[in-house]
């Protein structure tokens, strides 16, 4: 008479144990998948042997990772002066180089009393890769880099009336910085700078990294040193998809027809172009409160940036 209820209770208990074990196994699988999923940033770059100290990370510099929604992790770093920063600066790294090439620029800005953030967009440099991304720079949409920068500013940088922010992009990332000037309507963001921006046209795929073939230019030699010591930073070729998305980003920015606004109202925009040609002037003409300046190259970029920032900052007694 009691056999059936007894068997039933045993079956129920067994099912409960199996369900519990399945849930534990499922949780472990999810944790393992999270650890193994693509999209994690590289946060352990080693200083190359023989590198000049001027290219070292600034004192107190730390790496971090930031994920905007379901996108791969952006790679960012931050360092501040020993005093309360006068303002904050966010440098958006160019896809042509690992973010480490900007350490010298960071050091100059920090020496002048500014806190500096440095960020690589997903799919480039040491940032997280997309699913099935190979060893080429990749992005399924140019919006990804802009969304990541926008959310990073909101969630991590958190500019305020006491901590103004200036956003800087160079080369290809200059297009993202200048695009953000049309998207971000935060009064605590005081300025946007695009240095030597990409100005449309074909984008070369580039050559695969080789120890005997550094990229040309000032930052190319610095990049080569970091890439020699850090294989994770050797991504140099640009995928067809990334090229098309970058061309599309420029075309959209260059096609804007925004209303003319007061030169003194809102964030100021600066385009720094080594060769102030018609294309650069045309791009600037599409952006409210934009002006152009020539430059002597990357070596003088810190002074160009400091002059711009100081012009936007109130003078404290």
Image (cartoon, rainbow, N blue to C red):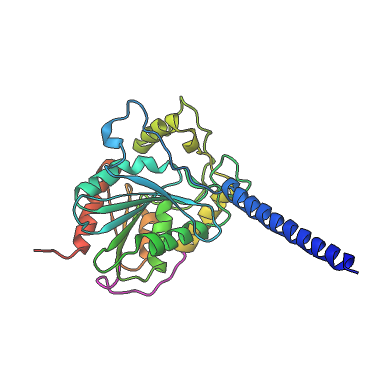
User: How far across and how far down the image is residue 270, in percent?
Assistant: 30, 59
Q: Main secondary structure of the magenta part?
A: loop
Q: Residue at 23%, 58% (x, y): give it.
A: 309
User: Residue 265 colored magenta?
Assistant: yes
The verdict on residue 28 being magenta is no
Q: Is residue 223 left or right of residue 235?
A: left
| Residue 14 percent across, percent down from the top left | 78, 58
Q: Which residues are magenta?
A: 254-268
Can residue 269 be spotted in the picture? no
Q: Nearer the viewer, residue 61 or 309?
A: 61
Q: Quadrant of residue 45?
A: top left
Q: Please tell me which residue lies in front, 173 or 42.
A: 42
Q: Is residue 190 visible?
A: yes
The residue depicted at 47 percent of the width and 26 percent of the height is 211
What residue is at 53 percent from the left and 44 percent from the top?
137
Q: Is residue 170 left or right of residue 311?
A: right
- Above or below — where is 74 with respect to 136? below
Whole-percent x and y of residue 275?
33, 48
202 or 93: which is nearer to us? 93
Query: Which is nearer the eye, 1 or 65?
Result: 1
| Extreme residue in the front direction | 1
Residue drawn at (27%, 41%) of the image: 299
203 relative to 45, above or below: below
Q: Quadrant of the N terminus?
A: bottom right
Seen from this angle, which residue lies furthest right? 1
Task: Provide residue 146's location: percent of width, then percent of height.
Answer: 46, 60
Q: Quadrant of the C terminus?
A: bottom left
């Amino acid at each position: 008479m009691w056999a059936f209820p007894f068997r039933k209770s045993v079956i129920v208990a067994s099912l409960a144990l199996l369900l519990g074990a399945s849930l534990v196994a499922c949780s472990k699988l999810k944790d393992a998948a999270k650890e193994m999923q693509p999209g994690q940033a590289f946060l352990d770059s080693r200083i190359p042997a023989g590198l000049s100290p001027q290219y070292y990370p600034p004192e107190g510099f730390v790496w971090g990772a930031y994920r905007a929604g379901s996108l791969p992790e952006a790679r960012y770093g931050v360092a501040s002066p020993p005093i309360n920063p006068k303002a904050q600066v966010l440098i958006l790294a160019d896809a042509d180089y690992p973010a480490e090439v900007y350490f010298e620029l960071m050091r100059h800005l920090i020496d002048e009393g500014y806190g500096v953030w440095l960020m690589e967009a997903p799919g480039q440099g040491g940032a997280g890769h997309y699913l099935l991304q190979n060893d080429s720079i990749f992005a399924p949409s140019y919006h990804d880099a802009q969304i990541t920068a926008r959310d990073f500013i909101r969630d991590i940088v958190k500019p305020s009336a006491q901590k103004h922010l200036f956003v800087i992009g160079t080369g290809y990332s200059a297009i993202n910085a200048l695009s953000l000037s049309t998207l971000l309507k935060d009064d605590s963001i005081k300025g946007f700078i695009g240095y030597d921006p990409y100005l449309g046209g074909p984008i070369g795929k580039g050559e695969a990294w080789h120890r005997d073939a550094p990229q040309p230019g000032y930052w190319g030699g610095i990049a080569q040193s970091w890439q020699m010591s850090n294989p994770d930073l050797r991504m140099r070729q640009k995928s067809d998809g990334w090229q098309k998305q970058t061309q599309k980003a420029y075309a959209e920015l260059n096609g804007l027809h925004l209303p003319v606004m007061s030169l003194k109202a809102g964030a100021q925009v600066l385009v720094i172009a080594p060769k102030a040609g018609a294309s650069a002037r045309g791009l600037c003409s599409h952006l409210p409160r934009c002006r152009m300046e020539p430059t002597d190259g990357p070596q003088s970029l810190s002074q160009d940036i400091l002059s711009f920032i100081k012009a936007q900052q109130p003078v404290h007694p």
